[in-house]
Image (cartoon, rainbow, N blue to C red):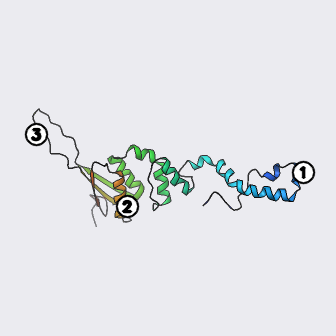
Amino acid sequence: MSRAAVPGLPSPHPIGELLPALFAEDDFAQRFTAGLDTVLAPVFATLDNLPAYFQPRLAPGDFVDWLASWVAVDVDPAWPDEVRRAVVGRAMELHRWRGTRRGLTERLRLVLGAGAEIVDGGGVSWATAPGDAPLPAHSGEVLVRVWPLNGAALDEDQVLAVVRAGCPVHLTCRVEILPGAPGRAEG
């Protein structure tokens, strides 16, 4: 929807009513100012509702995409509108947890409605006594197991895109898509 021309949108401040009495009865002046009212009504409506434009739940759909650029969130146009709004609304939280197990799990749940289990071999070793042999080096690979939470099958390309966006750059993320939550008895 365009906010530039909304048919039938009344102006909260019609210019014709503000004219001096000399022009109040002038047909041309009233028609001319009515044309201006048509042009200015969307501007007034936007300004009167400006706080709602900065809330992703309430903003017009095209403005949500613009808000996403303000908070540095990449939204996929293929995502449903409610998912884009949720991602933009929680952008600061998602940024805070980016590159972590929690962040990737939450992003998969929010964007795809998927549960996730992330298995990381860790990259830290320690010894209780001097001279103990260190543990083998971390492989640099993270296993991400993903399964649908709502019963619908997951699109592999979408899962890979979300995992790539949330996986730390110094690690390799391997993805397994499961039919259901791990540990659940298959029937």
> Which residue type carries mark 1?
Leu
Tag 3 residue: 133
**x 52%, y 52%: residue:** 66
Mark 2 and mark 3 in contact? Answer it, CB < 8 Å: no
Which element is circle 1 on?
A: helix
Residue that extends furthest to the bottom in the rendered view of this protein: 187
Q: In whole angstroms, how far apart are the C-alphas of marks 1 and 3?
A: 98 Å
Tag 2 residue: 158
* Relative horizontal placement of residue 72, taking residue 9 as reference (left or right): left
Tag 1 residue: 22
Sequence-wise, which precedes: disc 2 or disc 1? 1
**x 37%, y 46%: residue:** 98
Mark 2 and mark 1 in contact? Answer it, CB < 8 Å: no
Bin the neighbour count of mark 1 within 10 Å (Cα to Cα): few under 14, some 14-19, many 20 and up: few
Q: Between 148 and 124, which is closer to the camera in this rendering?
A: 124
Residue that extends furthest to the top in the rendered view of this protein: 130
> Which residue type carries mark 3?
Ala
Sequence-wise, which precedes: disc 2 or disc 3? 3
Quarter of the image where one finds residue 108? bottom left
